[in-house]
Amino acid sequence: MSRAAVLCGLGGALPATAVTNDDLAAELDTSDRWIRTRTGIGVRHVVAPGEATSDLAVRAGQEALASALRAGGQDAAVDLVVLATSTPDRPCPATAPDVAHRLGLPGVPAFDVAAVCTGFVYALATASSMITAGVAQRALVIGADTFSTILDPDDRTTRVIFGDGAGAVVLRAGTADEPGALLGFDLGSDGSGADLITVRAGGSRQRSSTEPPGAGDHFFTMDGRPVFTRAVLDMSRSSQELLDRIGWKAGELDKVVAHQANIRILHAVGGQLGVDEDRIVANLDRVGNTVAASIPLALRDAVADGGLRPGHRVLLTGFGGGLTWGSAALVWPDLDPR
Ligand code: ACO
């Protein structure tokens, strides 16, 4: 049986401060009703001043490592850390080495992957490939973002959607017939849509300009309607391509865990695939869109509430800035995330 990366640990972390829709309606021209009906979101969590992406990543990583230990994974030490984030602690250096250091993993290779909301799937594919190639034996893959630190406080379209958080999994070397084995990936990008989801300032493009940065150029911006359309299209197409490649039918899926962008997007993807709503995992009512943390946090909540169980056929699919998209498939293993 061929060598494969096997998921064997799961964890997550949210900041303490919860922001309800009514909290936002008190300061912006919006309402609990609009946010719930247009996005499905009820509450999101935001970091405290001084709290950074790495702080959440470390907590999620600790929980995932503890979960892997409980699942019987005392055989090998983690020898790779991949952190998906587009809100690193600072532009340089990468945040992953600091996270690895604080997790007590000295000397391990550690790097960031930037694919915005698709970051976790890209990081999972990267770590999985390094394990199957024999470069690593056991990897910690974290998705962590703190978009509250880059949102325009006056932009109601983004303030209502995004929340902060971190989610993590542990992968180990194993074989493709084991529960938890990552069975395949589909990844893609379309840079012609780079301006649809962007932060204009803070990179090399702006320094080469003769113009000083504009007042709001460090804020995140998103063109919601075309992003909505592309999210549905690209997650559906990517999911179907992966299913065809690994020989699964959509009707055989027990759970679809898609990037938690908007409940209407999740249901539209389900509709495109022919997967009914009770097989679509949704936790965005509790956490909002947590960007790279979204898929592992949705997995963690689905396990905790009993909806995702060992033996389930699971499809993961994400879409985000870049534009980027990606999907992965596995049979869910027996895990105890908390
Ligand atoms: N409260 C009240 N009204 C609002 C709000 C709000 N928070 N936001 C927008 N509106 C208004 C608009 O001004 C507009 O008013 P108008 O008709 O008078 O012009 C109306 O509501 C409809 O606006 P739309 O933009 O068409 O609203 P839509 O239903 O598309 O919802 C949203 C907007 C939630 C942003 C949606 O487009 C969306 O979810 N987009 C995709 C987001 C996504 O998938 N992101 C994933 C990738 S993100 C990443 O990678 C970081």
Image (cartoon, grey):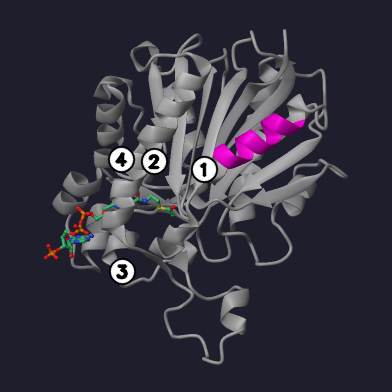
Depth order, front residue of 64/175:
175
Residue nearest the viewer, comparing 209 with 106: 209
Q: Secondary structure at mark 4?
A: helix
| Residue behind mark 4 | 285
Q: Nearer the viewer, mark 3 or mark 4?
A: 3
- Locate residue 174, reporting x and y percent: 73, 15
Disc marking residue 155: 3
Q: Residues within 10 Å of mark 4 (few under 14, many from 20)?
A: some
Question: Which residue in the protein does label 2 denote?
Answer: 234
Asked if the residues shown at circle 2 and circle 1 are in contact, with their CB atoms under 8 angstroms apart, the answer is yes
The main secondary structure of the magenta stretch is helix
Part of the protein shown in magenta: 121-130
Determine crowd level at label 1: few under 14, some 14-19, many 20+ residues with C-alpha closer than 10 A.
some
| Residue assigned mark 1 | 188
Question: Residue drawn 31% across and 69% down?
Answer: 155
**Could you tell me which secondary element the residue under label 1 belongs to?**
strand
Residue 58 place in picture, x, y as percent: 66, 45
The first of marks 2 and 4 along the sequence is 2
The three-letter code of the residue at mark 3 reads Asp
Q: Is residue 312 visible?
A: yes
Mark 4 / mark 1, whichever is N-terminal: 1
Give the spatial CA distance, label 3 vs label 4. 20 Å
The answer to whether marks 3 and 4 mark residues whose Cβ atoms lie closer than 8 Å is: no
The tag on residue 27 is: none
Is 322 or 218 nearer to us in this picture? 322
Magenta stretch: includes residue 123 = yes
Label 1 amino acid? Gly
The quarter of the picture where residue 183 lies is top right
Amino acid under disc 2 = Asp
